[in-house]
Each structure stands twice: as C-alpha cells, then as structure tokens.
Image (spheres, rainbow, N blue to C red):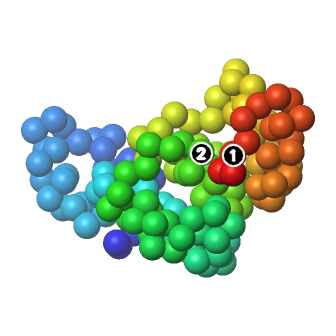
C-alpha cells in the first residue's frame, strides 16, 4: 500500500465539492484504506515502527502463527475482543494505538468507565506489556483475566 500523508488528503477534502467525490476517490484510490485490510496494515505499520516481529506477537499473545495471521489478515474474524487486546499488548501498543486497532477491527475501544478496561489502560500507560502481570492486576481487583486458561 502506498502512502500519502493523511493531512495531505485532509487538505484536498477541505475544498472538495460533493460532485467531485468520484474523481477524489479515483485519483487517490491507491491511498485509501480497504476496510478489510486497514486493520492488517495498521497492525503491521505499528509493529514495524516498533521493530517487533509478528511471530513474537503471536507467541506472546498465546495464539498459533497460523491462527494469528488469519485474524490479522481478517481471513477469520475473531469475536473475542480480548484476543485483539492481547495482540496489541504483545505488540507494545499504546492506549491510543490499541483503541485504533480495536476500532479498525470493529470492536469497542477501551473505555475508562469500565473497571476491567481501566486496569488495561493503566497497564498500557505504564508500559506493562507482560500479560501475566496484567492478569495479576485484573485478578487483584476481582476482574476476569485477559489470557485463557
């Protein structure tokens, strides 16, 4: 996927009239996010930026490489929000990056008014990327762990 800075596209849209949308899409087609692929590209971009390998993310998140890659490529759609959160934690994502990944995957962002989400947010903000440490924090507050038994 080629890149064009989002702010450049934002500037173009500022002066685009409704009847010009067709040509805007045509001229910028190669820069547009494919809904299905947006999650995959986003995850890959963040992991590349952090120099983290996908196979390590799968391993730390507790999924097989084949299953993890099917989830990332959206070949298979996970209904388990915790899985996406575990992948983000394994990838050392920030709170914002995790929320963006959840949103792109079609799931609810981490919500400060939810106790369990609050624990995860605090972990991310304190750069705690060890799932077992986060599980301990959750258990300590009587909340469900992120990892499977």
Residue 33 seen: no
Residue 79, above or below 77: above
- Classify the position of the N terminus by image quarter: bottom left
Left or right, 38 with reference to 97: left
Residue 6 % position (x, y): 43, 55
Other residues around mark 1 within 10 Å, as few (<14) / some (14–19) / many (≥20): many
Q: What is the residue that sits farthest to the front in this orientation?
A: 149
Numbered tag placed on residue 76 in the rendering: none
- Residue at 63 percent of width and 35 percent of height: 110
Sequence-first tag of 2 and 1: 2
Q: Residue at x 43, y 60 (%)?
A: 71
* Rendered image quadrant of residue 47: bottom right
Q: Where does residue 147 sit, x and y in percent of width and height?
A: 69, 51
Rendered residue at 69%/51% (across/down): 149
Q: Is disc 2 in contact with disc 1, using a CB cutoff of under 8 Å?
A: yes
Tell me what residue is drawn at x 38 percent, y 47 percent. 10
The residue most toward the right is 140
Residue bearing the label numbered 1: 146
For this orientation, the residue located farthest to the top is 113
Residue 81, compared with residue 38, is above or below; it is above
Residue 30 vs 94, above or below: the answer is below
Vertical placement of residue 50 versus 118, above or below: below
Numbered badge on residue 82: 2
Query: Cα distance, mark 2 to mark 1?
Result: 6 Å
């Amino acid at each position: 996927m080629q890149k064009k800075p989002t702010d450049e596209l934002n500037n173009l849209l500022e002066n685009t009239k409704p009847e010009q949308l067709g040509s805007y899409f045509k001229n910028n087609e190669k820069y547009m996010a494919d809904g299905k692929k947006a999650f995959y590209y986003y995850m890959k971009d963040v992991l590349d930026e952090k120099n983290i390998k996908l196979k390590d993310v799968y391993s730390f998140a507790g999924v097989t490489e084949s299953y993890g890659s099917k989830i990332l490529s959206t070949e298979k759609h996970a209904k388990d929000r915790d899985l996406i959160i575990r992948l983000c934690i394994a990838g050392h994502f920030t709170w914002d990056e995790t929320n963006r990944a959840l949103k792109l995957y079609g799931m609810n962002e981490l919500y400060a008014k939810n106790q369990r989400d609050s624990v995860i947010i605090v972990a991310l903000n304190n750069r705690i990327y060890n799932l077992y440490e986060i599980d301990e924090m959750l258990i300590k507050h009587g909340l469900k762990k992120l990892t499977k038994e």
